[in-house]
Each structure stands twice: as C-alpha cells, then as structure tokens.
Amino acid sequence: MVSDEILRTHLQELRRGTVVVASLVALRQPGYGYALLQRLTGHGFPVDANTLYPLLRRLEEQGLLTSEWNTEESRPRKFYRTSDSGEALLGRLLDDLAAVQTSLTGLIQGVDR
Amino acid sequence: MTSLTDRYLAATLRSVPAARREEIATELRASIDDMIEGRTADGHDTATAEREVLTELGNPAQLAARYADRRLQLIGPTYYLAWERLLKLLLSFIPALVGIVVGLLEATDGDKTGGAVGAGIGSAIEVAIQIAFWVTLVFAILERTNTPLNLPDWTVDQLPEYRADRQITLTDTAAGIGWLVLVIAYLPVQHFHSFVPNPNGGNLPILDPALWSFWLPFLIAVLVATVGLEFAKYRAGRWTWPLVAVNALLDLAFAVPVIWLMSTDRLLNPDFVARWEWLGREENLNTVATVVVVSTILITLWDVVDSTIKAYRNRH
C-alpha cells in the first residue's frame, strides 16, 4: 500500500495542468474568483484559493483571459472571460488531453497505435 | 482598528510590484469577503470565518510570490550544478593555498612566528567563507534576473574514463597526502614545540632557524607541489610519463637541498646539536649526516625507479 504522502504528490502532479483547462472551460461564461472556485470545486476540480487567484491574473497577463470590473453589486468584482486566444489554446489542450486518454486506453488494452 | 483582513492585505501587497498593487488589493479584498460570506452563510460567526479564510489563503509572503511569479528558492535547477561545480573547484585549492602562504609569511616574519599555524588556518577558513558567500550571491542574482549562462551542453565525451584496473588507489593517495601534510605541518611545529628545552627553559628548534630565510619555505613549497602531484596522479589513475618527470623533478628539488644542507652541517640547529653530548662529537654528527644523506638518496632513487617501472608497464 502506498503511503498517503506519495499518493498525494502523484495526484497533485497529475492534476496540476488540469486546473488551467478547467478554468478556461468554466470561464467561457464570465465569472469572478470566488464564484469560479465554487464552480470548479462543485465539478470535481478542488483547487486552493491561493493557487487559483494568482493563476487567473497570470492567464490574463498571457492574454488567455480578458477581464472587466463589475461595480454594480455589493462589492466591486473582477469578472474574467476566456479570450479568443484562450479558446484557441484550450482547443489544443483538450485535444492533447483526449490524446493522452486514447493512448492510455490503448496501452491498457495492449493495442499498438 | 485594523481588521485581520487589512493586515493580511498589507502583508501580501508589500512584496507585489507597485504597478499592480491597487488592482490586486481590490480584487483580493473582494475575494476574501466573498469567502467569508460563504462561510457565514453556513452558520459560522464572522470573526471565526475570517480567521479560517485567511488561514486557508496561507502565508502572505507565499501568496505574494505567486502573484509576482517569483521563485521561492535561492538557486534553482538551472544554475545549481554550475554553482556546485564552481564552488567545489574554488574551495578545493584557494583556501589551502592562501592559508599556506599566510602561514609561511607569518613564520618568516621574525616577531610573529608564534602564531604562524593559527594565522594560516584562520585565513584559510576566512577565504573559504568569502568564496562560498560571493559565489552563492552571484548565482542567486543570476537566478533572479534569469541571466542565461550559455554553458556548453553536456556531451557523452565528458564522461570520465572508467578504469577497473587503476594503479593509483584512493587509499594510496589519501595516505600519501596525509603523510605530506604531516611533514609540512612538522616543519613549522618543530620550530616552536620540539619538546627539547634550551637551558633557559625555552624551546630549542631541531632545524637551523636560519633556514627560514629561504630553504625551509622552499622545501614546504616543494611538498605542497607534491600534494598537487598526488591529486594529479589520482585523477590520471595511473603513472604517465609527464607524471614521472614531474615526480622526479620534485623528488630532486627536495632531496638535493636536504643532502647539501646536511653535508655542509647547515640543516640541524647548532644549539640543538650542542645540547646533546653524544651528537656534539664530530664523528657522531658525521655518522648522523651520512645516514640522512644515504637514506635520502635511497628513498629518492627508489621513488623515481618505482614510478618509471610503473609507467613503463602502462606503455601498451
């Protein structure tokens, strides 16, 4: 039986890139930090707040997200939305994710590509 | 009174680039308030919820580093191996070299001979610390500025030669160096602690103190060079002709002065000789001189011949 520590680090490694993919998918509909956090958690993508908030800013700097301030509600909130280049990148990432899944299935079933 | 959230924001924003501070502050505050609200809706009181949320967000310095995309490491994998290699290279000989030079200078300086060994070791340690500090500082700066090093890529040609049949073993080298270091250390030590008291209760050096003006430092330099030869021999793994030549040269550089000084009665301290009735007699001193000269010649000859035979065996 593997120790919890080893299991945790391997799961973390496996999940690392999927937060970006999940965020780009979720933000096809505009959303702000905390709401996105709730949505991702609700869909089985548990992510730490101190990872997600800086990540959103980084994706914005890379031009993958656009943002807009909404000051109509009780407190000013920054709404993010997946940009066109974010959508293009997401397409590539989803293709790759599917390719990984296909390869893995093939490997498990012993079928050569 | 400032709330915990205010203090948390201030601590986080302190190390975030000023240009983005305002915007991050507004957004992070809203996010924290959202999180607190989410928890109070579940029935927690506001103060507890605030503590929990800030605890969840974690160390402000770490959060700020994530916002600023800053690395939480002094020297990362890009530079670590270059740093390690340079540090090892510099530490392998510079502190020892400086220590020996300083020790020799102190020893030859008439007034301060007492602390020569201590001064040498002290300077060696000081130099080692300085090297470690400055090399690490430079690499830490490179890490932060992302400066490319442009080092040549690793190639298979850099693999060290593997020799199962090495002629020069680690044990031989370690013993050789250990012996040389003892001899090097003994030369200054006998000057201060020969364990032979003079009639006034002071210390009586065995070797003639007049030799410190040139010959003893020269012999120490030859011995230090021989330590270097031991390293070179170990790296090569076997005797090569250049090593044989350098070895013979160093052997002669040591033996010739010793033989010459001994046969002209200049090696031993005249006061030391006079202290012993037996040694003080002319014929006995000559016997000692002959024994020293002959054994020096034999040892030197044996060492040169031995290295030559071993190199000769390696020729094919």
Image (cartoon, helix red, strand yellow):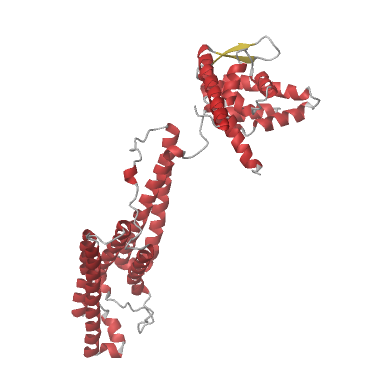
Query: B183 and A94: which one is in front?
Result: A94
Looking at the rendered structure, the number of numbered marks drawn on it comes to 0
Q: Position of residue A37 (x, y in %)?
A: 66, 22
Q: Nearer the viewer, residue B212 or B39?
A: B39
Q: Residue at horizontal 30%, vertical 57%?
A: B236
Q: Quadrant of residue B99?
A: bottom left
Q: Residue furthest top?
A: A72
Residue visible at 29% across and 76% down in the picture: B207
Determine whether, in the image, residue B158 is placed left or right of residue B293.
right
Left or right position of A106 against B265: right
B287 relative to A67, above or below: below
Q: Position of residue B201 (x, y in %)?
A: 39, 82
User: Visible in this render: residue B35?
Assistant: yes
x, y (%) of residue B225? 27, 61
* Quadrant location, the N terminus of chain A: top right
Q: Position of residue B262 (x, y in %)?
A: 22, 78
Q: Is residue A102 left or right of residue B166?
A: right
Q: Nearer the viewer, residue B308 or A97?
A: A97
Against A22, residue B189 (above or below) is below
Q: Quadrant of residue B282?
A: bottom left
| Residue B34 in the figure: left or right of residue A14 | right
Residue B266 in view, yes or no: no
Q: Quadrant of residue B141?
A: top left
